[in-house]
Image: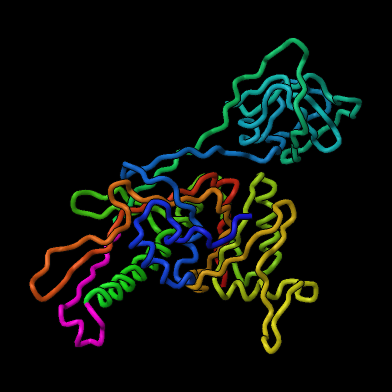
Amino acid sequence: MIIAGKYTTYDSPYLDELVKGIAVMIDPKLTTSLDLFPEFEPINTTKIKWYDAKTYALEGEVGAGGWNDSDTAGLPVSAEFSQLANVGDVLRIEDEYVVVKAVDRTGNTIDVYGRGHGGTTAAAHLATASIFILGNANVEGTVNGDSLLEDSIEQVNFTQIVEEPIEITLTAQKQKYLDVTDKLNDERTKAMTRALKKLNQAVLFGKPSAGSKTTPRSFGGLKHFIENTSEAFNYNVAGAFTETHLKNVLLEMARRGGSPDTILCSPDIKSVINGFNASNTRYTREERMAGVLVDQYEGEGVGVLKIVADPFLRHSFGEMYVVNTRKLGKTWFTDDKLRFEPEPANSRTLKETLQGQLTVKVKDVVTDFARMYGIS
């Protein structure tokens, strides 16, 4: 499992030693979500593009009008299923099996080789009856698929310019600092803290904008991609969060073939999770220390997930996320990586700016991510 919080700024292979040396002094709690994003090679464009495959579950429904117990052509199926099924797919509808002979992706119907495949019994099926794909079997010597290509989702994001000012006077000694360098590094640490805290919020809640010559560019964060990607999983809790809600989300992610590894939530929600199945929770505590902590949760079909509480993901936002950190990424612009740049000053001051240009990527949103909202 990827260890949550592993990808800290001071571990970056792409930033200079001064930046990493200052970043190491930042409290990790201030960059909890930012540190879930692995860093990849810097880019040389202010706009990045990638493609996500729509990976559907292998199931659908009987279409409007239903099926009788004898027709083999023009059998109605749901619109989603007509885009998924292909020639040779073995289908189970209730207790009957059939094998697909042809697919009409415009009319949302299928033809089958016969009814009651494999010794099962042909039967009538009402609209919305579930259809499951249980394999693929074709006639020997034929290759007669109809070029099924899964839809691809084009994702776009932009870089965002980070700037934090640094200024000191040359009377640092009077402020009980040994020299100007001590004071400068103190101000650099403050600027780094401000910048990384703001980026921590941006990777969660940022909205993408291409900007212009007079308006700033900004990148979209985790919420944007889950909330605005077609077929992505947004689950309305509509009240108090319970373990049932989490189980519902993880079961659906397993159905979609997702591989989440982290639950990202507010401290308030973490305290609720700490109480799940308390009598059977295994934990050890040092003597004279109270409290129950649950750091991992095992979900059916998805395995063990790390639980991460971000203090800046406030309960009042009413949201939490289930993510696959292996599908996240952050990167700097190649000639605009995070750095301290000197600025024009005068004989009595020193000025710098902590600056850089960053963007993030969230891949395979439909399968590997979920947003839970409406939490009271």
Toward which corner of the image does residue 370 lie, by quadrant?
Answer: bottom right
Horizontal and vertical percent for residue 239?
60, 70
Horizontal and vertical percent for residue 146?
62, 19
Horizontal and vertical percent for residue 33?
49, 63
Q: Is residue 175 magenta?
A: yes
Taking 240 as reference, is 121 left or right? right
Which quarter of the figure is the C terminus placed in?
A: bottom right
Residue at the far bottom in the pictured view: 288
Relative to the observer, which residue lies in front, 123 or 271? Answer: 271
Residue at the far left in the pictured view: 347
Give the residue at x 67% y 86%.
289
Give the residue at x 74% y 33%.
133
Image height of 277 relative to 110, above or below = below
Residue at the far top in the pictured view: 141
Image height of 204 relative to 347, above or below = above
Give the residue at x 82% y 32%.
124
Taking 337 as reference, is 238 left or right? right
Q: How many marks?
A: 0
Horizontal and vertical percent for residue 5?
53, 62
Tell me the colour scheme of the image.
Answer: rainbow
Write down the region rendered in magenta.
162-179
Which quarter of the figure is the N terminus placed in?
A: bottom right
Give the residue at x 49% y 66%.
32
Relative to the observer, which residue lies in front, 60 or 174? Answer: 174
Image height of 228 relative to 376, above or below = above
Toward which corner of the image does residue 182 lie, by quadrant?
Answer: bottom left
Q: Is residue 131 magenta?
A: no
